[in-house]
Image (tube, rainbow, N blue to C red):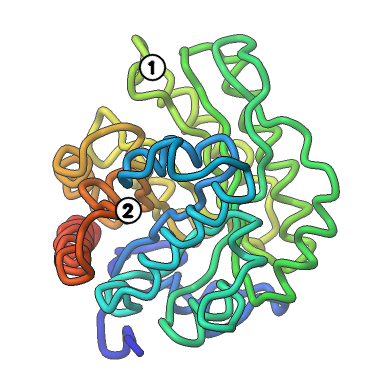
């Protein structure tokens, strides 16, 4: 089992370099790994809407399954192959984000989240949002999340440390950005009350014609919301790689921010890694960029080698 013992924290300040208080409901070992560990978060949270595309990229088209149940069996087999690979370990991977159905399934007779932590020393995270509402004011807030309290309780039972929820910002519209950030922090409060650490993900579309301007509005809105958190409350942020290098350093160093991670957002692995390496103390939380080039048709030896190369490149970009 991998360990971060003896490795220096990658964060230069803020929560990563101070003795900020920790919510007593949060697992301490997981908290410390996420706070100070070197590595990145593997986003393996393909859900109902994204599963067909993820399987196609993996080399399995619609002929590989005929029902939704078979489709989800295929995605679980794919994700299990990633997680059980010897290349997938806690030395380079801090955590992994799961979809609800993946959390409720097993790997080698053990719940997926439990397997990640107990067998791989990888902190389990859970995607909790139910997709995006229609675009309003250049942004898409999240659809309602029914039965969130029950989902959070089940996540705690499985040993999940943190949740993730995604919104999308497409234009530099103040009303849209404020709607996204306000909703994210409102739901984050409920997640914190349940003893989990929320990842707030207000993705800025990489194709936005006003991406830099949208990022200006987003950072200001996040900083305004962070003021409302108590000193013992910390959230994580998952943000699009910015147009200006080091743009989110103020958030990285903020005492209420446990960690800032970056999504690949449609950039290729090479471009995402190059951008990430220029944003010091921000670590990856890649999905498509992580799994790029990995297919069902590869032998286990080929697959493990390709996954190892992918993880090594993302790890290197994450520890700058």
Q: With 285 as the anchor, is 301 left or right in this view?
A: left
Residues 272 and 180: in front is: 272
Distance from disc 2 to disc 1, alpha carbons, whole Å, reads 23 Å
Question: Which quadrant of the view contains residue 112?
Answer: bottom right
| Rendered view: 174 above or below 157 | above
2 and 1 marks in contact (CB < 8 Å): no
Q: With 288 as the anchor, is 273 left or right in this view?
A: left
Q: Which residue is mark 2?
A: 284
Q: Position of residue 167 (x, y in %)?
A: 57, 32
Q: Which residue is mark 1?
A: 213
Q: Position of residue 43 (x, y in %)?
A: 43, 54
Residues 274 and 122: in front is: 122
Q: Earlier in the sequence, mark 2 or mark 1?
A: 1
Answer few, some or many: residues within 10 Å of disc 1's Cα (few below 14, many 20 plus, some between 14 and 19). some
Q: Quadrant of the C terminus?
A: bottom left
Q: What kind of element bears circle 1?
A: helix
| Rendered view: 37 above or below 144 | below
Q: What kind of element bears circle 2?
A: strand
Residue drawn at 29 percent across, 51 percent down: 291
Question: Which quadrant of the view contains residue 55?
Answer: top left
Closer mark to the observer between disc 2 and disc 1: 2
Q: Position of residue 149 (x, y in %)?
A: 84, 56
| Rendered view: 25 above or below 291 | below
Q: Quadrant of the N terminus?
A: bottom left
Residue drawn at 53 percent across, 69 percent down: 124
Residue drawn at 68 percent across, 52 percent down: 229
Q: Position of residue 238 (x, y in %)?
A: 46, 46
């Amino acid at each position: 089992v991998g360990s971060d013992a003896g490795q220096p924290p990658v964060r230069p300040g803020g929560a990563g370099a101070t003795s900020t208080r920790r919510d007593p409901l949060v697992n301490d070992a997981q908290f410390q790994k996420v706070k100070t560990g070197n590595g990145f978060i593997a986003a393996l949270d393909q859900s109902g809407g994204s599963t067909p595309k993820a399987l196609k990229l993996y080399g399995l088209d619609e002929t590989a399954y005929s029902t939704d149940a078979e489709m989800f069996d295929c995605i679980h087999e794919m994700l299990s192959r990633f997680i059980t690979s010897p290349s997938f370990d806690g030395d380079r991977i801090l955590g992994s984000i799961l979809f609800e159905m993946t959390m409720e399934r097993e790997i080698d007779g053990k719940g997926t989240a439990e397997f990640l932590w107990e067998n791989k020393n990888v902190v389990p995270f859970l995607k909790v949002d139910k997709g995006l509402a229609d675009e309003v004011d250049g942004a898409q807030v999240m659809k309602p999340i029914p039965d969130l309290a029950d989902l959070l309780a089940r996540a705690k039972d499985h040993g999940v440390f943190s949740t993730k929820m995604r919104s999308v910002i497409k234009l530099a519209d103040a009303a849209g950005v404020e709607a996204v950030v306000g909703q994210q922090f409102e739901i984050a409060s409920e997640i914190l009350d349940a003893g989990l650490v929320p990842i707030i993900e207000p993705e800025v579309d990489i194709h936005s014609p006003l991406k830099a301007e949208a990022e200006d509005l987003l950072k200001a809105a996040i900083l305004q919301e962070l003021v409302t958190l108590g000193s013992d409350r910390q959230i994580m942020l998952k943000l699009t790689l910015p147009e200006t290098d080091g743009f989110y350093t103020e958030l990285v160093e903020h005492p209420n921010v446990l960690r800032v991670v970056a999504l690949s957002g449609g950039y290729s692995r090479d471009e995402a890694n190059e951008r990430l390496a220029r944003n010091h103390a921000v670590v990856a939380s890649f999905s498509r960029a992580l799994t790029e080039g990995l297919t069902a048709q590869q032998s286990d030896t080929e697959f493990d080698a390709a996954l190892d190369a992918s993880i090594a490149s993302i790890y290197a970009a994450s520890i700058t």
